[in-house]
Structures are given as structure tokens and as C-alpha cells.
Amino acid sequence: MDSSKLILSVPISLFILVINLCTVPMLGCFDRIITFGDSISDTGNFYLLSGKANRSISALPYGETYFRRPTGRWSDGRVIVDFVAEQFNLPFLPPSVGGNTPEYFQRGVNFAVGGAAALNNSEFTRISGLNTTLSDNSLWVQLQFFNNLLPTIANGSDVSTMMRNSLIFVGEIGGNDYNRGLIAREPLEKITTWVPYVVSAIGSAVNDLINLGATTLVVPGNFPIGLHSCVPYAIPN
Ligand SMILES: *[C@@H]1O[C@H](CO)[C@@H](O)[C@H](O)[C@H]1NC(C)=O
Ligand SMILES: *[C@@H]1O[C@H](CO)[C@@H](O)[C@H](O)[C@H]1NC(C)=O
Ligand SMILES: *[C@@H]1O[C@H](CO)[C@@H](O)[C@H](O)[C@H]1NC(C)=O
Ligand SMILES: *[C@@H]1O[C@H](CO)[C@@H](O)[C@H](O)[C@H]1NC(C)=O
């Protein structure tokens, strides 16, 4: 891990700084961006996986200020990773479930799925005692999906070279593990015991990616949720 430019838990302002370390011309700095995460980064996976219809994100105001139509983003405009892609003169990241050719993945791919947790469903149930009926789009599952697509993304060339030339975002992810507990009205003291498991799942994903050759990873921290936030569902009784 030492030789990698690993940025752990950086606030957004800092990761913009990291990006600016890249010298002009921006184009050529990275061949592509690869992203894992949840609704903060999803550019259409949940939308495609859920059959598009009858989801809040399938209708305006989602998409109205920039794309002028719903695109599967949990935003009326662009999401953070869209702005990052623009800075690198790369196209907006296509959702991983939307295609399966080297051409589709050539300049980037986004594995983030709205609602995704860091822990897979069985691991979440094991540590929390809570059942989840949500489909498992966890970081764990996203990595498996990524591994299956690796030969296509690398298009027959060396995987570690492809990884070295990619900018990789692992997250934001993990917020939904805590959200599940907050929605179930679990006590904060219990939810905080999950933190080491969530952090370890993210760390293990980062290690897997480094072992595949990744050298530039951004691991954004979680937004403030729970006790000190103004998210109504998260305010304790
Ligand atoms: C979406 O909702 C409408 C109105 O409730 C319903 O008629 C339609 O069958 C639903 N479509 C899908 C794909 O579930
Ligand atoms: C993938 O590899 C084939 C064979 O080398 C090449 O013709 C094609 O242009 C490549 N596609 C991309 C997107 O790099
Ligand atoms: C869930 O994740 C754990 C590691 O956190 C792994 O050991 C386990 O095999 C995974 N389970 C499934 C069903 O994918
Ligand atoms: C979770 O599901 C299992 C199997 O359906 C059930 O036995 C158990 O009581 C459930 N636990 C909770 C906390 O709902």
C-alpha cells in the first residue's frame, strides 16, 4: 500500500486538490476513471437495474437542471464524479450495467449503485442482527462485477497497466450501512460498533484494487449523518 497515492477519508475540498496535482494537459493524465459507490456517485445503475419505471429518480426534477431528463442520477444536475470527469476532459462515466464492450468502458466505468452498502447483506446481518430485504449491490458485489469485466475493460492488454493508468474512486461508500441502522431506529451506540467492519470492508476493496495494479485511488469520507446532522430520519428519538 505504501507506494500508492492512497488518500483516505478526504473531504471534498481536499480531493479536488489531489486532482489538481495532475499536470496540464489534463487529457492524458488518466485514461479513464473507475468508480465504486452509492447514490452519491451512481450515474444510472440503480435506474437500469430497477427497470427504470416508477422510481422517484425516473421523473423530474431529477435531471432537470443539466441533462433536462432523468438519467438515473440522484440529483437534479450532475454528481460529483461528473465534475471530476469534466476536469480531466473525460466523458461522463457510463453505468457499468449499461454496456459490455471495450468501447463502452474505454474512458471510464461507474459501478456505484444507489442504496449500496459497503458490507454485503450476509455480512451486514452477521454484525448487526438486522435482516435486509434490499438487493445486494454492496461494494463487495460491485468488486465481483468489476473482476468479471476486467478482461473487457483491459481489452486484452495488461490489467496492471490499465489499472495504473486509471483514476479510481472507492466511495463515498458506507453511509448506507449506517443508514440501515438509523432507519431501523437502532441505538447510535450499537451502530457505532459497525464502524470497524465497514472501514475494513472498504480497506479490503482498496487492497484488492492495489493488488490489481491501481496506483491512484481516492477514498472519500462519509458525509455527516446521524446525531449531529439535520437529516430528519437520523435524528434520534
Ligand atoms: C407504474 O405505476 C403505474 C401507476 O401506479 C402502473 O399503472 C404501472 O403498471 C407501473 N409500472 C410498472 C412498470 O410497475
Ligand atoms: C480492443 O482491441 C482490439 C484488438 O486489438 C482493437 O482493434 C480495438 O480498437 C480495441 N478497442 C478499444 C476500445 O480499445
Ligand atoms: C460477504 O462478505 C464477506 C467479507 O466481508 C465474505 O467473506 C463473504 O463471502 C461474502 N458473502 C457473500 C454471500 O458474498
Ligand atoms: C431475520 O430473518 C430470519 C429468517 O427469515 C428470522 O428467523 C429472524 O427472526 C429475522 N430477524 C429479525 C431481527 O427480523
Image: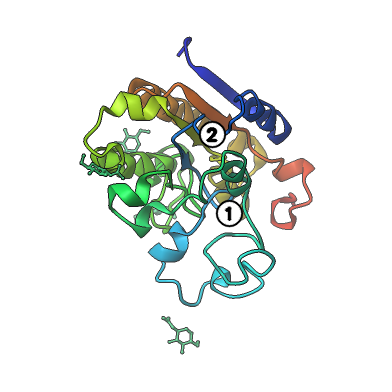
Give the structural element (helix, strand or loop) at label 2.
Answer: helix
Q: Which residue, given by chain and number where applicable, does mark 1 sit on?
A: 184
* Colour scheme in use: rainbow
- Look at the picture and state if 175 lies above or below 9: below
Cα separation between marks 2 and 1: 14 Å
Establish whether ligand 4 lies closer than 8 Å to the Cβ of label 1. Answer: no
Q: Which residue is painted at 62% across and 40% down in the image?
A: 87
Name the amino acid type tagged 2.
Trp
* Disc on res. 97: none
Name the amino acid type tagged 1.
Ala
Position of 9 with respect to 118 (left or right) is: right
Give the structural element (helix, strand or loop) at label 1.
Answer: loop
Q: Which residue is painted at 37% across and 59% down in the image?
A: 98
When asked about the image quadrant of residue 201, the answer is top left
- Decide: few, some or many residues near mark 1? Use Cα within 10 Å; few <14, some 14-19, many ≥20: few
Q: Nearer the viewer, residue 28 or 101?
A: 28
- Look at the picture and state if 200 lies above or below 44: above
Q: Which residue, given by chain and number where applicable, does mark 2 sit on?
A: 194
Q: Nearer the viewer, residue 114 or 198?
A: 114
